[in-house]
């Protein structure tokens, strides 16, 4: 019924290796940079192939421990860890020779207490760097072994890499891409060396580190007596979201279609005091990987890592996203079994190199939040604290809501509520504002987790995930509205009364109760939304199917309506036995107490049975539809010769007529109401345009 969604990090983490672990901590990390950046192997220079990097915002070709530590933010959920971690990008090579990036949302990083000497494991020292894996490998090396003795058996170091196909039935992990038909994603996994010579922070041949005898356990060789905390990284690729075909194959960015050459890099950027205490007190503690079980880490944990530290602008001036004519760099795809040669993975002398932008390193961001009872924001406003939201099935502030995805600040919310006659202003999710003249009497203050930065000012905090920061307008000149519509106190009373009234049966087009906000940011129905204190199922249906034309509509939190054409962002239809269960859709609609309008981050989803999916015209005159392509991810448009916009009358015919009249060879539409054209052929046309081409010309299906 719904389109496939990209697997969400952290949802499916169990593996044979990790299941056996007793002591570790695990953190989720989002992408912070993509491109040919590798300050470990290629400091100050262009790297040979493209990487996905997670961690510190200051990562770049010249990154050092000090510059990483000085980053404004990190894309990992432990803010005291400003290290950088990176692995190669994965692409799908189509039969026509183009390469399509395989989506993924970041990586999961494990710090494990492992080894015979685990009681004495040490933190990574300041300035430490290492690389695990060999990008040139194209077959399994069963001869190069780890250190062993009579008591501890060695193991092929090729076992440092493994792949897990997450499908309906579990499969045994393998050290290569043995199966890429995985409904829930293909997970690439890499173990790092845990044995250090105690002298060198980095050696270009990686000789300063060695693997334990069993790679993830065992003993260290005498040449490397210092046992470090064991590092393990998982990257989940959404292989099922790529439309595959005969003659195509998945290929890593260094030209590896096998997976044997998967690898990972690590550059330490930890706050050393925090890492030292965490390794001493938490890496060897049986805590099921929970950061919350380690006080020194919990003190800097945030679930808003993705929102507070989004992906940085690319430092390398070349495309890496979308569909490309070739792999970034001078890469040849080598299938093996022989190793790839250096000439297959590097540019020859004299090649024109992609430009490297000079980036100014950021500095740590200070965030301002008033003490409880203190003044903050506009004159007269006092901070009441961080409270839970939807307490007792009603928002903590319930009368009015607005969203500002790009410019929300505490002051914006205060001004919005004050201008509408509401004394209390509350911010949450970094971008949402709530108003009321009463506070839900069941709300609990002082519970914490208000750590989302405001979208309009990253030095301010705007609540958290279902956590609201509330401000009280104490100005004696403030005159509140006399309206009680949606008032939290009244809503709580009516909720108690409506609980005794059976809800009306769901309509025949009801799909079910679905999870929402799986990633604490992206919605399951994510096209457009409406909030109203008079929300009903009928109001939402009209908004999504008449005012707007979408295939599905859903309601949640009693007063919110969302529209979309598929269930995205990891959302899923719940059942009576799932966790959570479909019974969590239990909130009565704010405008009709006999109807159910979802729950807390749970949607009651309906199908628009009259919806007709848009049809791609195979041709318009002499122009033929060739495919969906993307705009350049640097600047400008894929088709830049001429353009016009129409929000009400855009059609493929009018687009082609416009471009033909101006003598252009390409015509394309995007964003529902824009037409663009270009005067010269371009075989690198890329992003979200549907493009028509004249039949007598040879043009690229992008």
Image: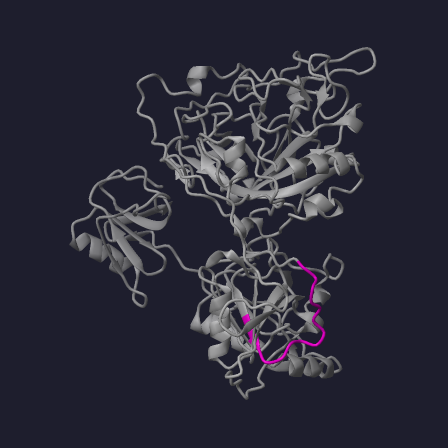
- Start and end of the magenta stretch? 434-448
| Magenta stretch encompasses residue 520 | no
The single residue placed furthest to the right in the displayed view is 151
Determine the image quadrant of residue 13.
Answer: top right
Determine the image quadrant of residue 74.
Answer: top right
- Residue found at x 67% / y 48%: 299
Q: Quadrant of the N terminus?
A: bottom right
- Residue found at x 49% / y 23%: 41
Q: Is residue 661 above or below residue 318?
A: below
Q: Quadrant of the C terminus?
A: top left
Magenta stretch, main secondary structure class: loop
- Residue found at x 27% / y 39%: 682
- The image shows residue 414 at horizontal and vertical percentages of 50, 71
| Magenta stretch encompasses residue 447 | yes
- The image shows residue 353 at horizontal and vertical percentages of 33, 26
Q: Front-most of 573 and 160?
A: 160
- Residue found at x 35% / y 51%: 690
Q: Is residue 672 above or below residue 503?
A: above
- The image shows residue 120 at horizontal and vertical percentages of 77, 26
- The image shows residue 81 at horizontal and vertical percentages of 61, 39
Q: Front-most of 616 and 261?
A: 261
């Amino acid at each position: 019924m719904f389109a496939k969604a990209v697997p969400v990090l952290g949802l499916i983490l169990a593996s044979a290796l990790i299941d056996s672990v007793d002591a570790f901590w695990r953190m989720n990390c989002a992408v912070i940079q993509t491109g040919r950046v590798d300050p470990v192997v290629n400091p100050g220079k262009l790297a040979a192939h493209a990487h996905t990097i997670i961690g510190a915002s200051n990562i770049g070709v010249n990154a050092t421990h000090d510059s990483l530590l000085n980053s404004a933010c990190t894309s990992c959920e432990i803010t005291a860890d400003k290290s950088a971690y990176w692995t190669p990008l994965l692409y799908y090579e189509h039969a026509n020779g183009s390469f399509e990036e395989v989506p993924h949302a970041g990586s999961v990083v494990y710090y494990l207490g492992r080894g015979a000497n685990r009681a004495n494991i040490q933190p990574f020292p300041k300035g430490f760097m290492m690389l695990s894996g060999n990008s040139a490998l194209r077959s399994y090396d069963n001869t190069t072994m780890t250190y062993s003795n009579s008591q501890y058996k060695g193991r092929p170091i090729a076992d440092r890499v493994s792949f897990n196909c997450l499908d309906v039935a579990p499969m045994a992990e393998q050290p290569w891409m043995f199966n890429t038909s995985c409904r829930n994603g293909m997970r690439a996994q890499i173990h790092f060396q845990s044995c250090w010579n105690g002298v060198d922070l980095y050696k270009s041949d990686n000789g300063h580190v060695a693997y334990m005898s069993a790679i993830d356990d065992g003993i260290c060789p005498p040449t490397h007596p210092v046992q470090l905390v064991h590092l393990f990284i998982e990257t989940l690729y959404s292989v099922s979201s790529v439309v595959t075909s005969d003659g195509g194959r998945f290929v890593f960015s260094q030209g590896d279609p096998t997976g044997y050459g998967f690898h990972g890099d690590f550059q330490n950027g930890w706050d050393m005091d925090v890492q030292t205490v965490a390794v001493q007190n938490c890496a060897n503690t049986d805590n099921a990987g929970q950061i919350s079980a380690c006080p020194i880490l919990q003190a800097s944990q945030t679930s808003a890592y993705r929102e507070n530290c989004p992906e940085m602008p690319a430092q390398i001036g070349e495309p890496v996203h979308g569909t490309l004519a070739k792999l970034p760099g001078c890469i040849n795809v080598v299938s093996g079994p022989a190793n790839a040669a250096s000439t297959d993975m590097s540019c020859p002398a004299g090649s024109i190199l992609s430009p490297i932008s000079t980036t100014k390193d950021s500095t740590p961001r200070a965030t301002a939040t008033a003490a409880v009872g203190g003044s903050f924001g506009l004159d007269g406003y006092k901070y009441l604290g961080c409270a839970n939201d939807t307490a007792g099935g009603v928002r903590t502030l319930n009368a009015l809501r607005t969203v500002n995805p790009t410019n929300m600040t505490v002051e914006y919310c205060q001004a919005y509520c004050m201008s509408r006659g509401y004394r209390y202003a509350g911010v949450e999710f970094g971008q949402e504002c709530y108003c009321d003249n009463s506070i839900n009497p069941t709300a609990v203050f002082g519970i914490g987790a208000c750590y989302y930065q405001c979208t309009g000012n990253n030095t301010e905090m705007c609540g958290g995930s279902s956590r609201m920061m509330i401000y009280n307008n104490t100005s004696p000149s403030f005159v509140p509205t006399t309206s009680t519509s949606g008032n939290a106190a009244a809503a709580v009373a009516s909720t108690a009364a409506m609980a005794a009234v059976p809800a009306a049966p769901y309509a025949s087009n009801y799909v079910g109760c679905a999870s929402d906000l799986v990633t604490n940011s992206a919605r399951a129905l994510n096209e457009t939304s409406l909030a109203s204190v008079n929300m009903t199922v009928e109001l939402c249906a009209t908004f999504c199917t008449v005012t707007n034309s979408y295939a599905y509509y859903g309601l949640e939190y009693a007063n919110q309506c969302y529209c979309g054409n598929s269930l995205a962002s990891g959302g899923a239809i719940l059942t009576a036995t799932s966790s959570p269960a479909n019974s969590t859709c239990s909130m009565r609609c704010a405008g009709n107490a006999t109807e159910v309008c979802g729950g807390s981050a749970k949607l009651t989803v309906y199908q628009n049975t009259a919806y007709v999916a848009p049809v791609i015209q195979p041709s318009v005159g002499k122009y033929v539809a060739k495919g969906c392509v993307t705009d350049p991810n640097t600047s400008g448009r894929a088709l830049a010769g001429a353009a016009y916009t129409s929000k009400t009358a855009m059609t493929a015919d009018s687009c082609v007529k416009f471009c033909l009249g101006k003598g252009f060879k390409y015509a394309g539409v995007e964003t529902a109401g824009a037409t663009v054209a270009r005067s010269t052929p371009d075989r690198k046309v890329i992003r979200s345009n549907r493009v028509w081409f004249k039949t007598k010309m040879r043009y690229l299906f992008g």
